[in-house]
Amino acid sequence: MSEFKELIKSFSKSREYVRDFFVYGFKTRDEFSGWSGRTYDNERRRLESWLSGYVKQDYTSKGKNIYLSIDSNLLDTNPLFRVWKAKSFTDNDIMLHFYILDYLLKSPEQTADEIADGLLKEYGKVFDSQIVRRKSNQYAAEGILIKEKSGKEVLYRLAPPFQELLTAHSGLENAIKLYQLSSPLGIIGNTIMDTASFQNDLFRIKHNFFVHTLEDEMLLLILQAMHERKSVLLNIKSTKSENFLEAKGVPLKIFTSTRTGRRYLCLYLPDKKRFANIRMDAVKSIKIADLYPDYEAIRDKLEKNKESAWGVSFQNDNRHHSEHVKLTLRINEQSEKYILKRLQREGKGGAIQQIAPDTFTYETEVFDANEMLPWIRTFIGRIVSIESDCPQLNDRFQRDFLTMYHMYFK
Amino acid sequence: MTELFSEVYNCYFQVIKSLIEKKNFISEKEVTLHIKNTCFEESILYLLPKLTEQGWGFYEKQDGLLHSRLSENFYVPLTDLQKSYIKAILLDDKIGLFLDDKEIEAISDAFSDVEPLYLPDDFYYYDRFADKDDYKNPDYRNHFRTILSAIQNHEYINILYESRYHRRLHHSYLPCRIEYSIKNDCFRLLAVEAHHSQQPQVITLNLCRIQEVIPTGRIARQLPNISHLIQHSRYHEPVCILIKNRRNALERAMLQFANYEKSTRKLDEDIYECLIYYNKETETELLIEILSFGPMIKVVGNETFLRQIKERLMRQAAL
């Protein structure tokens, strides 16, 4: 039996496990399909080690299940960031990291051979100069070292300390404390806090979905393709089944829901001449492909189109270009002004009109009216009528409402 | 593009760096404690021998203490990935709360060798509320900065506040944290009242309704533990819901409620029970989130929450 290791080489397998534990949190050992019992045990132990303090366990008739219970509003940072800090390394990696950086701090502008000699002299550590050169080049590519040619020699020196910039602009430190929680790719902000040795003592976050960080490796590649105006080849796993499929398209934007926790990649599909949104958590691998010549034009088209999408759908089942929706709502105009405010701030620019005492209409035009149903249900208790050229909308609302009514009162 | 999943960001690397920064001489006990507090649960087993015995050689033993062989002013420069992240956040509209235009330009110039990791337009929050805070308003910026400084100094502040019903309220508070809501795109102050009883209550104030903030010069010995206070404010009984796993409802619900402290168990083939913990502050929001699932979710407890759901259904049936 191989020895248990806390650190990992590749992120992909653990990403699935953390996601399952974090999002579901009710699966027992037997219910994790696709993994052997030993894999489950190792992954569970790793997760308990990485996220100790956040892991809880329950005992059910079907066995023990462990889960992550995290109230994002109570935390100074996203605990799932810790998963990104578990990359395995060799003894040489860690020694070269500290010794090269320390040596170049004392003796700036050195060749790889000089660094190798310096490591022996200063710290008594023997490293082949090829290994030192490889690590120095890696760190120059990362931006940690600056590599410059001087005649025939290649010299390395440390990049300037970030602390100088933080001291000159103290607001930057506080900004990073906020953005590591609130921005896309906040994990990178969090690593800056590690590098500069400070912690968030100021901010809390609401309506953030911590689980999104597990997609950040994919997100980086997508952003790279977007900025280079290139197409991508995606390997996608269905969120409803175990099936995998391939897709090729032009990545244009990341669509994020602040309510449902879903995040999508908006692609243009040149073959089908339409936009499509794909769940980010379904994307398992990405290959950046060729340049897409009409990138700007298609992105402009998306900018215009997205205003008419209620959510992430750009078409409907009724072959309409768009669908009209009119809600008539009972709202006490004296005591329930907050409902009118809700319509204004959540209604994406729909028209609100008072048609009678305590009766208001809300009207809008969207690509797919069915996408509005969950939002419409939040007004249960005041919906007088739903009119739409999407006939399924009212039918589904009425059918679902009757089912709900029977659930509670029959 | 440099790697995100890289050993450079590894927890062990960070803990060693912070140990070196801490002091030149350190006891084994301090090293142990620091690793336990900052690293993974099992890291100590691997890391401690590498630091204290014949391992990586960063320390040598002197008079029973560990002496660092690395410089006191040791530092790790930022990677290009980190620099390009900073350039991305400099483009966000909230950055003006922290830095003025000249500072933004100076920081951007310092990282002129990298491009921003992303642009604000790369992301679209399609269901975000429309009435966001005005981050460009000079008063708003001043209030924000005064509050930040008061939190860091543990200083009481006097706040003139306009309530939802347009009443002007004047109170003294100890500010504890600023909360940012991604959905509302707004900030709220989490504070406790200056003259509170033994168990202080967390007060939430919208920053956009604050009219005036005046520092008092009075300093509190320490800030209360706001997480404990929020947890304490939760109802004893969680809401108990049954999720019917049709139309992918289980996956949708688990993701949507991932922000709440909750526990879930399977009752039978397609029914799951989920307990969600909440307080008065989040009650209405949770209620309408549950309603949005329609018949896929049934509330079975607690009584107060169940009664509110039933009231809305009865009102709807009467229309």
Image (cartoon, coloured by chain):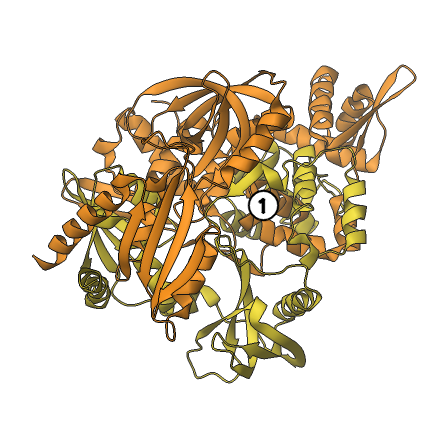
Asked whether A123 or A244 is in front, the reply is A244
Q: Position of residue A316 (x, y in %)?
A: 36, 33
Q: Is residue A275 left or right of residue A331?
A: right
Image quadrant occupied by the N terminus of chain B: top right
Callout 1 amino acid? Asn
Q: Chain of mark 1?
A: A
Asked whether B172 or A358 is in front, the reply is A358
Q: Position of residue B298 (x, y in %)?
A: 19, 53
Q: Is residue B281 left or right of residue A249?
A: left
Q: Residue at x 32, y 31 (%)?
A: A317
Q: Is residue A304 left or right of residue A52?
A: right
Q: Residue at x 69, y 35 (%)?
A: B79
Q: Position of residue B245 (x, y in %)?
A: 21, 40
Q: Is residue A407 left or right of residue A219?
A: left
Q: Colour of chain B?
A: yellow
Image quadrant occupied by the C terminus of chain B: bottom left
The residue indicated by pointer 1 is A190
Residue B171 in sight: yes
Q: Position of residue B283 (x, y in %)?
A: 33, 64
Asked whether B217 or A3 is in front, the reply is B217
Badge 1 marks a residue whose secondary structure is helix
Query: In the image as oriented, which residue stretches furthest toward the front?
Result: A355
Q: Colour of chain A?
A: orange
Residue A128 occupies quadrant: top right
Residue B155 occupies quadrant: bottom right
Residue A36 occupies quadrant: top left
